[in-house]
Image (cartoon, rainbow, N blue to C red):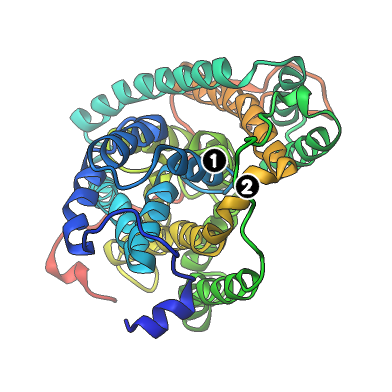
Amino acid sequence: MSDVVVDAIVPEPAVVFAPLTLRQAFPVWLRIACLSFGGPAGQIALMHRVLVDEKGWIEEDAYLRALNFCTLLPGPEAQQLATYVGWKMHGVRGGLVAGGLFILPGALVILVLSLLYAYAADLGPVAAAFLGVKGAVLAIVVEALLRVSRRALNAPVKWLIAGAAFLGLFVLGLPFPLIIAAAALAGTLLAARRPEALRLKPPLADAASPPSLKGLAVRAGRTVLVWAAIWAAPMLLILLTLGPHHVLFEIGAFFSKLAMVTFGGAYAVLSYMAQEAVQTHGWLRAREMVDGLGLAETTPGPLILVTEYVGFLAAFRAPAPFTPLVAGLLGALVTLWVTFAPCFLWIFAGAPFIERLEHARRLQGAPAAITVAVVGVIANLTLWFGLHVHCCRPSRPWAFSASRFARPEIQPHPQDPPARRPRPPPLTPTYLAVR
């Protein structure tokens, strides 16, 4: 890609942090990608140790400003932070390498595990292994709830926001995007009128004046147009060749929408994704959703890679006109594309404005309130997972209905409602081709 084309896609940074080539930085980004276990907290700590302490590629203050900016965005903040640092060092090529490598190892592992799950999940030893995974997943989600609560709930109004988010999901069954939008609006209003209620930090007294907006808006608009076209390209191809009712188009449309509301990390959006994937679309069963989270927890990379598992199984079980294997691979690829292409769009379009974040207190209010609402969202997720891991299951991800204040609709099982699940064919060369 020529320098002219690259510059047209996204503005290049004015200053780089380290006098080294992208070829020299490549093995470092690969090492970070392969070691990025432990969720966003562990991944951000790993990058801080390597990029700030060991390599000195970015200043501490710049790293924290970039992290604050990434928490404003939908999507995995650790992957977006890597993309930003790569962009800051080597322009758009550096951003693509750093952000792409952060995804690649985990995506490959999830693909292999999804394939194994599709063909062998019903076998005794594999089923027994996933029974243990379910309990571990529940413990991980509970730990995430406690960790986020300790950090986020440090003011009375924050407890109110978290409680309202939980009740909205668990009792009223409100859509997840509505919860996030309401929290963002509440945070913006509080930041404007009573910023002390959210315990927002004031702008630094010695902070430099924000960069001028002249020229940035035009180039950012160009970046949005180019990356929106990149984001939409496979969806247009699927629409023209397979139609709007094919499972690949449904997968792409759903995860494109999900990519725009993934504030607060993967845990925050999992209950919404589970509701849609299990009950609305019937792509997989509730217990299989828990298994997918367990797979994602054991692999490097962002936890939102669980979407690849869902996309693979959804296409694998409704493969026409492809074979199940080919359809599953296409489903995984489409899911990855529409999940992570927006992450590059947000960073490449918004990175030139990052210095203005310290001077925009109202913008700080929205992510602060969203972080608090995420506590209630994760509490809802914890209950939903707990009911499915143990001896009962709710008919919805929330247990109560606003129209009938009754006891939770819980039924004994051993069997969940079946997903669209044809018996997988044998792995032979014949099945690698389109029917």
Residue drawn at x 13%, y 63% as measured from the top left:
428
Crowd class of label 2 (few under 14; some 14 to 19; many from 20; radius 10 Å): some
Q: Which percent across, then down, holds residue 1?
A: 32, 81
Q: Which percent across, then down, holds residue 95?
A: 37, 60
Relative vertical location of residue 318 with respect to residue 230 in this rendering, above or below: above
Relative vertical location of residue 71 with respect to residue 212 in this rendering, above or below: above
Crowd class of label 1 (few under 14; some 14 to 19; many from 20; radius 10 Å): some
Residue drawn at x 24%, y 26% as measured from the top left:
129
Residue 358 in sight: yes
- Please name which of the two marks, 2 or 1, marks the residue nearer to the observer: 2
Are dots 2 and 1 in contact, CB under 8 Å?
A: yes
| Residue placed under numbered mark 1 in the picture | 68
In the picture, the disc for residue 357 is 2
Q: Which percent across, then down, holds residue 214?
A: 66, 71
Residue drawn at x 67%, y 24% as measured from the top left:
399
> Relative to 333, is 275 on the left or the right?
right
Q: Which of marks 2 and 1 is nearer the N terminus?
A: 1
In the image, 25 versus 53, the foreground residue is 53
Q: How far apart are marks 2 and 1 (CA)?
A: 8 Å
Find residue 16 and report its image quarter: bottom left
In the image, 232 versus 361, the foreground residue is 361
Secondary element at image label 2: helix
Residue drawn at x 27%, y 62% as measured from the top left:
325
